[in-house]
Image: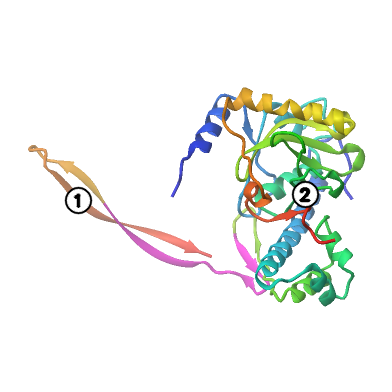
Amino acid sequence: MWTISRNRPNDQFERDLDRGFLRSAFLSLFWAVFSAKKKEEKLTLTQLADTLGVNKSVVSRWFSGDPNWRINTISDIANSLDIEIRVTAMDRATGRVFTPSGETTPIRFSLSVIDGQTQKDGDGVETRTPFLEERIVEIA
Amino acid sequence: MLTYNATDRILYQAVETGRLVRRLPRRQGGQELRTLYVTPKIADGLDGKDEQFKYFPFLPMENLISIYCAGHAVQVSLTGDSSKKPDFERLSGLDNVWALCARKPRFWQTRILGRFLSKGVFVGLAMYERRWLGGRKQYNKFAEAIPEKWASIFGNVSVLNASTPDDYFSGVVIDVDDIEK
């Protein structure tokens, strides 16, 4: 529960912001999947509710509000929509990415870039001198 | 590849001349599909620098801004049906004036009134506590001033006028006028 405060944002404010953002991420994710299946497979909220074993008004209320689902409910909705949820986490400070199996190891490879410098000689004729630049690229 | 279009130029000028400020979300979620521009006065209000908005920074508003900018699902009503409590409401009887609605807690509800310059680009032009706006008639009087505020910033630049929520919002949208009950 957040509180009104005249103070600057504090830890509680930041925590509540994270909570709201994560709740909205799941709501948005499920609505995006439902919308696609509604369009392509004519899925309805009634069918989704039936699969979940809840009343349609409950599902309708979820998508008209800001539900704070339990993890089991998230799993059940994902199951009903026939999707697999994959979880990743990124360290805000370092950008390191983690999955439930551990930290992902970035793939490192070098990339050679061909570039060149253009010069004009005394007659105004342009010559291009190519050179190679090697860069290390990381892909998580 | 970077693209540079008319909308970018108009916004660049408005920001360069101090008429608008780009409001960055406090949470980004890896991408920013939509953008929010506000007047400097609104920006001060959001940051708690305006005595009128004593309880700001305001969590429900910051949360809504983060959700909007990230492209997460926003609840939208094109018919201006506030009974469905949308996050974004196109006010009926007005020329594409929208209200961005932070609805909780009830007594501290806040509205940012503004218009869309292009898809996913909302420009907030005035911010009010909901209780200041009073009943619908008085609310609309405040909202009627928005096109003039728009003109003072953008001149005769057209406002986005579209027929579906997806025309206004990139990312995920819940059309509350159309949701199954």
| Residue B124 % position (x, y) | 69, 34
Q: Are marks 1 and 2 on the same chain?
A: yes
Q: B9 or A104: nearer the eye? A: B9
Vertical arrangement, residue A135 with respect to residue A76, above or below: above
* Horizontal and vertical percent position of residue B13: 53, 28
Q: Secondary structure at mark 1?
A: strand
Query: Which residue carries the number 1 mark?
Result: A129
Q: Do the numbered discs 1 and 2 sit on residues whose CB atoms are within 8 Å?
A: no
Q: Nearer the viewer, mark 1 or mark 2?
A: 2
Say left or right for B10 vs A45: left
Relative depth, front residue between B63 and A33? A33
Disc 2 secondary structure class = helix
Q: Residues within 10 Å of mark 1 (few under 14, many from 20)?
A: few
Q: Residue furthest right?
A: B107
What's under tag 1, amino acid-wise? Thr
From the viewer's side, name the closer residue of B67 and A32.
Answer: A32
**Chain label for disc 1:** A
Residue under the image location 81 percent in, 30 percent down? B140
The residue beneath circle 2 is: A17
The amino acid type of the residue labelled 2 equals Leu
Work out whether residue A123 can be spotted.
Answer: yes
User: Is residue A68 among the parts visible in the rendering?
Assistant: no
In the image, residue B180 above or below residue B81: below
- For the C terminus of chain B, the image quarter is bottom right
Circle 2: is it few (<14), some (14-19), or many (20+) Cα within 10 Å? many
Task: Please give the range of residues in magenta.
Answer: A96-115
Magenta stretch: dominant secondary structure: strand
Q: Chain of mark 2?
A: A
Sequence-first tag of 1 and 2: 2
Who's the residue at 82% across and 25% down the image?
A: B51
